Image (spheres, helix red, strand yellow):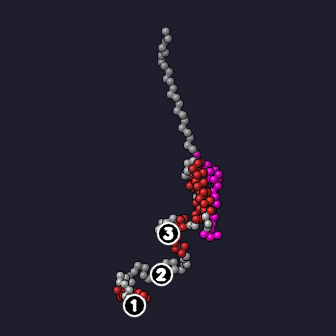
Amino acid sequence: MTERKPPGMAFETWVDNQITRSIARGDFERLPGAGKPLPNLDREETAYDWALAKARREGVDTAAMLPPGLALRRERDGLPERAERLTSEHEVRALADDYNVRVQAFWRRPQESRWSPLPGLADVESLVEWWYRNQPPAPPAPAAPEPPRRRPRWFRRRAH
């Protein structure tokens, strides 16, 4: 389709001419999938279903497609897994506080719809308690080395 539509010719007529010439040249013969039914014709697919399938095929994280309220709820549900990798109570508290600050900022913004889901705050204390319960036991501290023993002398010097 490298040629331009001639002036004065209707667009539909020009397209029909292009198709007729392609058929005459045999461009539509032996195409892959010829004679096979189209996949998923019986299933009604919404635009959301299509976008989700496309994102999965291309390896895109589908969580990025969630509305902000649902994304924050999902993040709150994943806080324990993220806290599990942290090494101190201070880091766990900072993680929960950062999440809570973002939720409070979300609450202050006008919502797109009155039906938008509202995320809740993370319970910092229960997250810290959970973190303490699920910490692997600390390895036993190495025992202090014993001071070297003095070897007994075989002879003693006599004091004069």
**Label 1 close to label 2 by CB (< 8 Å):** no
Label 2, label 3: how far apart the Cα atoms are: 24 Å
State whether residue 71 is above or below residue 158. Answer: below
Q: Dot 3: what SS? A: helix
Q: Where is residue 150 in the image (x, y as percent from the top left)?
A: 50, 24
Is residue 118 covered in magenta?
Answer: yes
Q: Which of marks 2 and 3 is nearer the N terminus?
A: 2
Identify the residue shown where x is 55% and y is 52%: 85
Identify the residue shown where x is 57% and y is 47%: 88
Of residues 110 and 136, the one drawn nearer to the viewer in this rendering: 110
Q: What is the number of the mark on residue 54?
A: none
Of residues 9 and 126, the one drawn nearer to the viewer in this rendering: 9
Pointer 3 residue: 55
Q: Where is residue 44 in the image (x, y as percent from the top left)?
A: 55, 78
Q: Where is residue 137 in the image (x, y as percent from the top left)?
A: 58, 46
Q: Which of marks 3 and 1 is nearer the N terminus?
A: 1
Label 1, label 2: how far apart the Cα atoms are: 39 Å
Q: Where is residue 60 in the image (x, y as percent from the top left)?
A: 49, 66
Q: Dot 2: what SS? A: loop
What span is in magenta? 112-137
Three-letter amino acid code at disc 2?
Pro
Residue 127 visible in the shown view: yes
Q: What is the number of the mark on residue 8?
A: 1
Q: How crowded is mark 1: few (under 14 residues within 10 Å), some or many (20 or more)?
A: few
Three-letter amino acid code at disc 1?
Gly
Is residue 121 covered in magenta?
Answer: yes
Pointer 2 residue: 37
For discs 3 and 1, the disc positioned in front in the rendered view: 1
Query: What secondary structure is the stretch in magenta mostly built from?
Result: loop
